Image: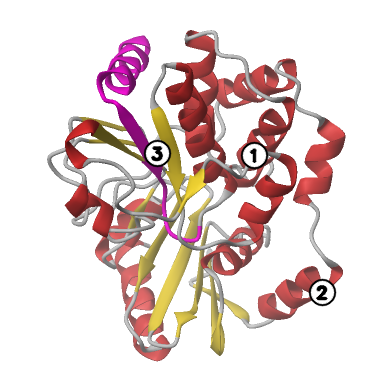
Amino acid sequence: MFEVFDKLTKKLKEYKNVLIVSHKNTDLDGLTSSLLICQIAKKFGKTSNVYLNEKNDNVAKVENLFASDLITSNCEKFAPDETLLVVLDTNSMVYIEEPKLLEIYKHVIVIDHHSRTESSIKDSEMCYINNALSSIIEFMTYYIKHINFKIDENLATLMLAGLEIDTNSFNFKTTPDTYKAAGILVELGASLVLKQEILRESREDIIKRNELLKKSYAYKDIVSICVLDEGKYSPVELAQVADELLHFKNIEISFCLGFVSKDEARVSIRTIGNYNAGDIALKLGGGGSVMSAAATVGNSLDKAEKEIKKLVGEII
């Protein structure tokens, strides 16, 4: 991995400006990693910003503890020929925060831990996709250790919280390197007390999720499917329900299906590792890793549910 780190450093130093972007509805993994790359680029003497056009609870958590002046919503802030676009935590032209950026900026590097899909970004100057990684935070933790870059204690705490979220409290997609990364973040000043505060949810959110879990049912003994109502849910809510479904006894694959906008349904897929969630999502037009994946599935929950059951029948 040292060769990848050195190549990343070379690319960050090559251009006058560095613009970093992650996926839509950004999470702590994509956002904290983006902010860290931004800081590193600035240390290298570059003008740098994180692109973000929509804010959510994760952004609020970061802004409460860390600098928000690194964020921009201006697509055309930099001269394209002098700018490196860094895409983190997604390799999809569909799920990137703003697809227009790929039209404006042609010098692109991609770093991700999700499997490639048909919508994967093409013609990048550097592309590192490793779906064995728990998160981009894991990659970034080893990168800053490699270049001996010191980070703010609050950012280290936010990264540790993001690492815990992406691994579902270190229960999924976790290797010895993942635990070592967590240890490095603690050494860098991450607060375990503050991390718990960041991860806490409201009583209302927990009760709402438990009500959603009641909509689930077992299918073919080892699969749990939850089809939500016609209301609008965030991708995070779908992912959280899918995570919780795996806690049910004997369940090895979970699906949570619901609308993320008026005309767009999405499915969040989780496995314990015996089946490949990314492969399942790929057949639905999406993508992900072995244990975590998602796909957009049109505008009919009934039709999507039937398609999911058909896929389950083919793999079990």
Mark closer to the chain start, 1 or 2: 1
The residue tagged 3 is 113
Q: In the image shown, does 257 or 224 lie closer to the viewer?
A: 257
Res 29 quadrant in image:
top right
Q: Amino acid at mark 2?
A: Glu
Q: Along the polypeptide, which appears first: circle 3 or circle 2?
A: 3
Image disc number at residue 67: 1
Q: Position of residue 257 (x, y in %)?
A: 48, 76
Point out the tag, 3 or 1, that comes first from the N-terminus: 1
| Number of the label disc, if any, that sits on residue 204 | 2
**In the image, which residues are magenta?**
1-25
Disc 3 is placed on an element classified as: loop
Q: Secondary structure at mark 2?
A: helix
Amino acid on which the number 3 mark rests in the picture: His
Of residues 231 and 9, the one nearer the viewer is 9
Q: Mark 1 belongs to which amino acid?
A: Ala
Residue at 35% in and 16% down: 9
Question: Height in image: 81 above or below 98?
Answer: above
Q: Residues within 10 Å of mark 1 (few under 14, many from 20)?
A: few
Q: Residue 217: x percent and y percent?
A: 59, 78
Q: CA distance from mark 1 to mark 2?
A: 29 Å
**Residue 82 coordinates in the image, percent (x, y):** 22, 32
74 w.r.t. 167: above or below: below
Quarter-of-image position of residue 156? top right
**In front here: 150 or 69?**
69
- For mark 2, does the 10 Å Cα neighbourhood hold few (<14), some (14 to 19), or many (20 or more) residues? few
Residue 152 seen by the camera: yes
